[in-house]
Amino acid sequence: MRYCLVSTNHLADALWFKDTDDYRVGMNLVAVVSCALGIPVLAFILMSNHVHFVLLCDRAKAELFITAFKKQYGRYYRLKYGTKELLRRNKVDIQELDPSDDSVEWAIAYTVMNSVAANLCISPGAYAWGTGNSYFQCPPAKGKRLDSLSGRARKRLLHSKADLPGGFLVSDNGYILPESYVRVRLVESRFRTPKRMIFYLSNSSKARQRLQTADEMIPAFSDQSIASVLPDLCRSLFGAGKASALSEPQLSELFRQVRFRFSANIGQIARTTGFPPETVTRLLDTYK
């Protein structure tokens, strides 16, 4: 068997997922693409500005998977936000994993710990948009069967005409539960026990990143929380509905307000406002 870790580059001045609906669509399209291509998923996570997948396939099929996912989600994104080429330009890194050692275990731990490293939750199981809560579950996940929905409702849910198995379970949050199609048992067989999985999670590079920066961390707001209030903030401060309509001095003040109100760093300000990090830094330094 062959395994691959697929990662997209972090978008510096934009977001893959701007709100909860975007995440729901992304979650459902993982199921659609996996079933359509017959490529098994072992783990994945959808972060605000990048994604990771651990797949049971070779490099060629991994590239096929991420290309299809970006294409389908990009179509939805373009129709909703009018943005072209954003995800097509987003570069991808594919690493082949050696199944004879514990590379697969480390890749899975790295993937699901992204949310913890980003200070979004205390454990991977608390993050909804991925497989952090899919392994060693007791009791097993519950949801509504996909075939209990009408054809029209399934199409709305999946943003696709794909014919997924009727036994797939839909969560209360409106997405296909990863346990319906992710190779959970294979992952559990590699880790063998929950205790051993916790070891890998606790010692992954993402866990070390969290510990190394712990002194700098304070309770943070998610990218989506900041992005959702930016129009109101622009209107209240400047009488404009979007950041792109502001002058440079006004942008500098907006960046300063976002940093002060949300404890945001340069990267988060750039992602949520849509300006390059270099522009954010320059304007914060120029208009003091």
Image (cartoon, helix red, strand yellow):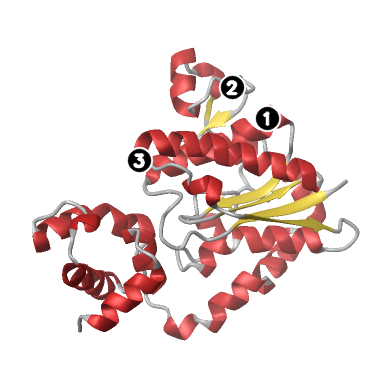
Q: In this view of the protein, can residue 264 be seen by the observer? A: no
> Earlier along the polypeptide chain: callout 3 or callout 1?
1
Residue at image point 27% right, 78% down: 284
Q: Which amino acid does label 2 sit on?
A: Ala
- Viewer-nearest of labels 3 and 1? 3
- Kindly identify the residue that appears in the image at 48 percent across and 21 percent down: 155
Q: Are marks 3 and 1 in contact (CB under 8 Å)?
A: no
Residue under circle 3?
A: 81
Q: Mark 2 points at which residue?
A: 162
- Where residue 157 appears, x then y in whole percent? 46, 27
User: Mark 1 is on which residue type?
Assistant: Cys
Q: Which of marks 3 and 2 is nearer the N terminus?
A: 3
CB within 8 Å, label 2 to label 1 = yes
> Which residue matches tag 1?
35
Asked which secondary structure carries label 3, the reply is helix
Dot 2: few (<14), some (14–19), or many (≥20) neighbours within 10 Å? some
Q: Position of residue 119 (x, y in %)?
A: 46, 68
